[in-house]
Amino acid sequence: MEMTDTLSVDLGETESPPGSARSAHDYLFLVLKCDAPAAHQLRISLKGVNEVLIGRGDVGADGDAEVRRLPGSARIDIRIPDPWCSKQQVLLSRTSGGWVARDLESKNGSSIGGVRFRKASLPDRAALEVGHTIFLYRELQGRLSFVGADLPCERLSPPQTGPDLFRTLSPQLQQQLHVLRRAAPSALPVLVHGESGTGKEVAARAIHELSGRRGPFIAVNCGALSPGLLESELFGHVRGAFSGATENRAGLVRAAHQGTLFLDELAEAPHAVQVRLLRVLQEREVLAVGSTTPVAVDVRVVAATHGDVHAMADRGEFRADFLARLTGFEIRLPPLRDRPEDIGHLAAGFLRAALGDRSGVTFDNDVGRALLRYHWPLNLRELERVISAAAVLVTNGRVSLAGFADRLEKVPDTSAPSVVPSGTPAPTINAPPHGSRNHLLAALRAHRGNISGAARTLRTSRTHVRRLIARHRITTEEIDER
């Protein structure tokens, strides 16, 4: 399985070789061309860059943006084939307080999060609309040590058939895919972390396909079966082992011989099953229920969980010895809300999957804006559902916001700037990202824990506020703190 499809673009000299680590990385992403959602997307590193000029390029070109930087220059020119864009539309400048965007008196104006501006600061996740093209500014924290993290430009080609959940512009996800590729050829077990809908089973299948193992890929959901049935399904049983065992059964572990056994929702596995799985990992043999004769097996185990099994092990809720054997490699898949730079190409892929070869379907600007603003609690699974539903209501080849039929809950747009006259300082926007814990906690404290009041402040529903409280595990004591 091909996980990424990127092309490096040489933009001249960089400050440090690929693979160097930093505590903060800032990027500009071309996330979505609303008039051509299947066009290329870009990730542009702003390392060593002080100015970015965005303007119209050759509209008659193949729909691809042109990115130029002279060797040794601290300025990047981005030319987009967007007829709604002026030849010189927006200038981004690095200042001591961060990046500032200035509209260069363009004909149609520029906006951030749908709000027109003449001069405005760029906070993290600011969605910059230039004509019918949407850029996203990201300031990413943390260590990015994989080869390619500091490439000046990454280009993601359009989807050919449908969504590939591991074609990405996200540096964090690319780093995890780098680990995945290195882990795949080994026989070591792999533990995949991630919320529901982030693609954990897709990652497990990719590991299996890249491993070259000759046996099958066998998946089992540890949370979908009762403890007794799970034990029997995994390890098999002999005739007469329990009521209803009328014949010998090999079990899924033996069925995965020379292949990969994928254990989904591992945190739900009972202790008795963990003990038996430990024997599979440690002794490479399986003992059927009711049998006294172990059978040798050659199985690669890949497990997935959305729970914190390390914390569970510390509390004695998960066997620490089993966890130690299971974590040959660990991979963490980011939720969709942490990789908004991928929403454009994922939406285009889901749209192509829903409509087949029908080409020329476009998005309204407010559709792209809504997709980037929403926090996607159900991740890729929810994005697929929303795009598939909207595709049914395509009118005259265009997807409008009405086609989403209120499927996207309204959330506050903290990336929208205030409109200010030219020549005055740009406003600083300190609000945290959509759906963040601090944002929610501040709203709850302002209303002394009242759910309705917090929902009004956040411009969302009471149900959604309760869901966020549960997800962030906010306690009454925290709300009462001042």
Image: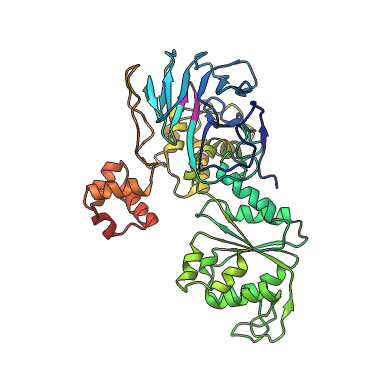
Magenta region includes residue 348:
no
Q: How far across and down, in percent of the image, does residue 291 sit?
A: 68, 85
Q: How far across and down, in percent of the image, does residue 334 sit?
A: 52, 49
Front residue of this view, candidates 376 and 438: 438
Q: Which residue lies most toward the left here?
A: 448
Task: Specify the color scheme.
Answer: rainbow
Whether residue 166 sits left or right of residue 386 in the image: it is right
Q: For the image shown, how many numbered marks are present on the structure? A: 0
Taking 122 as reference, is 54 above or below it? above
Front residue of this view, candidates 460 and 423: 423
Whether residue 207 sits left or right of residue 321 in the image: it is right
Is the magenta region chiefly helix, strand or loop?
strand
Determine which quarter of the picture holds residue 248: bottom right
- The segment highlighted magenta reads 129-135
Q: Residue at x 54, y 35 (%)?
A: 344
Q: Residue at x 56, y 78 (%)?
A: 272
Q: Which residue lies most toward the right here?
A: 214
Taking 417 as reference, is 229 above or below it? below
Determine which quarter of the picture holds residue 207: bottom right
Taking 14 as reference, is 276 above or below it? below
Magenta region includes residue 131:
yes
Front residue of this view, candidates 28 and 95: 95
Taking 335 as reference, is 289 above or below it? below
Q: How far across and down, in percent of the image, does residue 472 sit?
A: 38, 55
Whether residue 8 sits left or right of residue 49 in the image: it is right
